Image (spheres, rainbow, N blue to C red):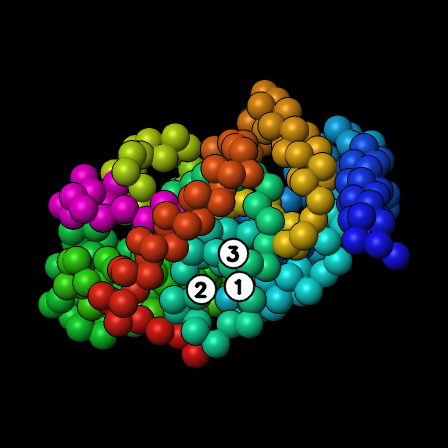
Amino acid sequence: MTGAGKLGCLIASCIVLFFSFAAAGQAYPTGTVRIVVPFSPGGSTDVLGRILAQKLSEELNGTFIVENRAGANTVTAANMVARSAPDGLTLFLTSSATFTMNKSLLPQISYDPVKDFAAVSLVAEQTLLFSVNAKSPLKSLKEMVDFSKANPGKLNLGIGAIVSRVAAELFKRVSGADYLIVTYPGAIPTLQALLGQNIELVVSDTGSFVPQIKSGQIRGLATTGKSRDVLAPEIPTVRESGYPTYDVPSWNGLFAPAGTPSTIIDRLNAAIVKAMSSPEVKEKVAGLGLAATATTAQHLENVVKTESEKWDKVIKEIGLQLN
């Protein structure tokens, strides 16, 4: 075959591949779509995933289900998704730490947060919350810090996710607070431990604790964002409590395996934009303590890059590394 003939075959193959991907995007989904959530059932990310699965099923006329794969600081689920076929039938709904903190905290992870995934869209944003049992004598973040300094080793602080661990370690650094960090497998077990008075303090996503705050079982001390949480506006931020540079936001994003056709990414993104702008969805998501959002895939990629650089620097300064 001549050089011109080979070139012609190559061009023809590219054209066929292009239209095959385009057709795949138009027909998507071609089977049941798993939205993998790296946390146990019942937490805010899990419930968010179920809300999203229902809306995507309606918008794309397909079947979307949630599959919980908890374990190893979200690494178990991330590895599974990274190895999945790039056909849009396996998606990954996770919190920010999976993509912005794990690489710095867990240098042995086998997935690459950038090379192994394709961003689809941000889905929700949230704050974290420092809280105590309502029976605790501690009424404010300052009281907690003062008590911990006067009674070193007496406070146990529970966390159920890596972002909470970083929030707790960073606050230790900026405040000089003294507490022992105890790890639980998710927000709900942490909440149960706090209600049972097995621990004195918790840092977790605000949404998982709002019902208990409203019922008077738990007292919120401070939230970790730049502004107060809309669901608990009576609770001051850490910044307002005397630590003006402190800011630990958290978000949930949807990703697919790297190599997923752009036509599928675009179709998913359009459906998410429509779903997350629905008043019904916004209300449900707000009930979790989250703010529903939707962005371009490129925006999510930029967020991952920017925050990864920020947290890599902070984690090195703290000297934190997990096994």
For disc 2, the marked residue is: 102
Q: Nearer the viewer, mark 3 or mark 2?
A: 3
Residue located 29% across and 34% down the image = 227
Residue 124 position in % (x across, y down): 51, 38
Identify the magenta region: 237-251
Taking the spot 48% from the left edge, 76% from the top edge, the residue there is 108
Mark 1 / mark 2, whichever is N-terminal: 2
Structural distance between the alpha carbons of marks 3 and 1: 5 Å
Q: Position of residue 262 (x, y in %)?
A: 67, 40
Q: Name the image quarter holding the C terminus.
A: bottom left
| Mark 1 closeness class: few <14, some 14–19, many ≥20 residues within 10 Å | few
303 vs 126, nearest the viewer = 303
What's the residue type where badge 1 is placed?
Answer: Asp
Q: Position of residue 141 (x, y in %)?
A: 21, 50
Q: Are marks 3 and 1 in contact (CB under 8 Å)?
A: yes
Q: Position of residue 176 (x, y in %)?
A: 15, 63
Q: In this view, which residue lies farthest toward the top?
A: 279
Amino acid found under the numbered disc labelled 3: Val
Residue at 66% over, 60% down: 81
Q: Nearer the viewer, residue 272 or 23?
A: 23
Q: Amino acid at mark 2?
A: Asn
Under circle 3, the secondary element is loop
313 or 96: nearer the viewer: 313
Residue, disc 3: 114
Q: Where 270 falls versus 319 (above or below)?
A: above
From what the image shows, is residue 169 above or below residue 133? below
Q: Is residue 17 visible?
A: no
